[in-house]
Amino acid sequence: MSLLDASLRMLDHLTPPRHVHAHCDLPCGVYDPAQARIEAQSVKAVMEKYAASNDADFKVRATMIKEERADLVKHHLWVLWTDYFKPEHLAAHPQLHELFWKATKTAGDAKKTNDVAVGDRLLAEIDEIAEIFWATKK
């Protein structure tokens, strides 16, 4: 063990632990459903490009990109649901749980298909969540 490692270990024992409580990762204001929407727009755009192409290699790459973007939609929705929304938001908007469940399921469905209608449905579901989100920011 180096002298630096030993010094850092000793400092760890000298510094009293601090307990921090927060209802989100950073002060509110850093969350936005636009992140999920941008990824959902990419999902839909890739679906459209897939349908317009006859190139098998392009279609394989498009499918991989679409699946990555659909996962990012789910990620951004989960962060918004678990880190931003609070019990009082759910009390005021009891449909929130169902909306998030449907949108994340639709993002999963988007990974299984190239049907542009699924991309449209995903965008509409994110827009419903965004409407409630912005109502809670007032």
Image (tube, rainbow, N blue to C red):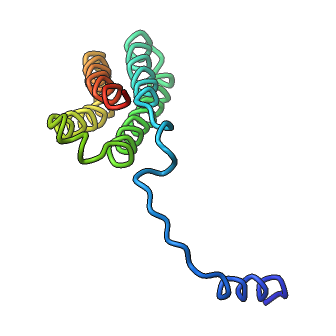
* Residue 125 position by quadrant: top left
**What residue do we see at 32% from left, 42% from top?**
85
Closer to the camera in the image, 134 or 45: 134
Residue at horizontal 37 percent and vertical 40 percent from the top: 80
Q: In this view, does 17 lie to the left or right of 70?
A: right
Residue 133 appears left or right of 62 = left
Q: How many labels does the image show?
A: 0
Is 8 in front, or is 74?
8
Q: Image height check: is 16 above or below 55?
A: below
Q: Where is residue 23 in the image (x, y as percent from the top left)?
A: 40, 53
The image shows residue 10, relative to residue 20, as above or below, that is: below
Please state, as top left, top right, bottom left or bottom right, where the C terminus lies in the image. Answer: top left
Q: Provide residue 9's location: percent of width, then percent of height.
A: 70, 86
48 and 107: which one is in front? 107
Question: Residue 5 is drawn in which quadrant?
Answer: bottom right
Q: Is residue 45 above or below residue 17?
A: above
Q: Where is residue 64 in the image (x, y as percent from the top left)?
A: 45, 34
Quarter of the image with the N terminus is bottom right
- For image coordinates 25% across by 20% down, the residue present is 121
